[in-house]
Image: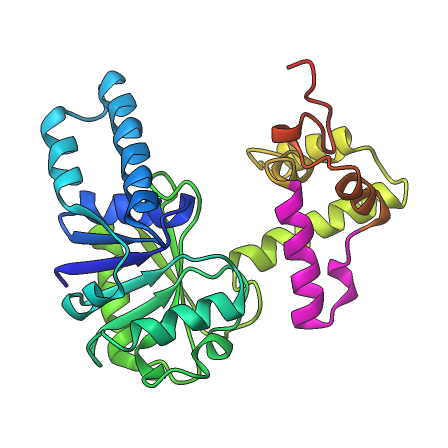
Amino acid sequence: MKNIMVCGSGAMGSGIAQVSAAAGYTVYLWDLTTEIAQNSKNKIAAGLDRQIARGKMNEEAKEALLNNLIPCCDFAVAADVDLIMEAVPENIEIKKSTYAKLEQYCRPDAIIGTNTSYIPISTLAADLQHPERFLGMHFFNPVYAMKLLEIIRGEKTSDAAYEAVLAFAPTINKTPVTCQKEIPGFIVNRLNKAVQAEAMRLLHEGVASCEDIDTAAKLGLNYPKGPFEMMDGNLELTYTCLNLLVELTGEERFRPIPELEALIAEGNFGRRTGKGWYDYSEQ
């Protein structure tokens, strides 16, 4: 692989583009307008400057990375790439619409990977002309720091596409794991949301407080953060993902508890709003 396209220049897309460009790949960072994509490149550059200030990168490496990163808004660049990684919003119709446009240009042998966190791969591949070259490539935030890459095979994913992505992962300094069965949430989010849902049930049933559950997880299970602390990173996303798991699996164990429903209704989404499970207003 030499040339890569990343569709979507948000936090995940720009992170994927950054680590790929750092590895020496030519990366087309696509978004709805070139200005949006360029703004994301500017944010990447600012982050690299902070790394230089900390002594973790030099100016030469920064310039090499940025030279490999090309903002764009034209799907036609897909004709020149070996791998496309889609990181548009977690919405089935938006993703499918993106693939339909990509397939007008990309080569039949070009691989398309989706960064979906929950949606089954075969659902997304249902309307593709070449579903055999489609699979899940689930990165974690922040992409530059998190070492894991979940690879998820769909029902029609070819061995060739899977093996190519498996070989690609270490070239961008990621450790791959394979989800052999495309369950909603895959490996990490299925584990993570199960822990969070159980923690909320313990709270709802009056077994323990948020603080004590988090302390138990950190000191008893050696978690770096407790489940409530983790959820407060983006409580709105937690709520959305739990409801999506209920919808996709039919399992009530993922149903948000009334206390979470109340926080969401009040606009309390965690650290960024000043309140979630914990109060951050005086921090």
Q: Which residues are magenta?
A: 235-256
User: Is residue 173 visible in the rendered structure shown here?
Assistant: no
Instruction: Report which quarter residue 216 is drawn in.
Output: top right
In magenta segment, residue 78? no
218 on left or right of 101: right
Instruction: Report which quarter residue 45 is drawn in.
Output: top left
Instruction: Report which quarter residue 108 is drawn in.
Output: bottom left
Q: Residue at x 68, y 37 (%)?
A: 269
Q: Nearer the viewer, residue 207 or 14?
A: 14
Q: Residue at x 14, y 63 (%)?
A: 1
Q: Residue at x 14, y 66 (%)?
A: 80
Counting the numbered discs, the total is: 0
Residue 200 percent coordinates (x, y): 77, 45
User: Is residue 230 visible in the rendered structure shown here?
Assistant: yes
Residue 214 percent coordinates (x, y): 69, 33
Model colouring: rainbow
Q: Residue at x 52, y 55 (%)?
A: 188
In magenta segment, residue 246? yes
Classified by dominant secondary structure, the portion drawn in magenta counts as helix
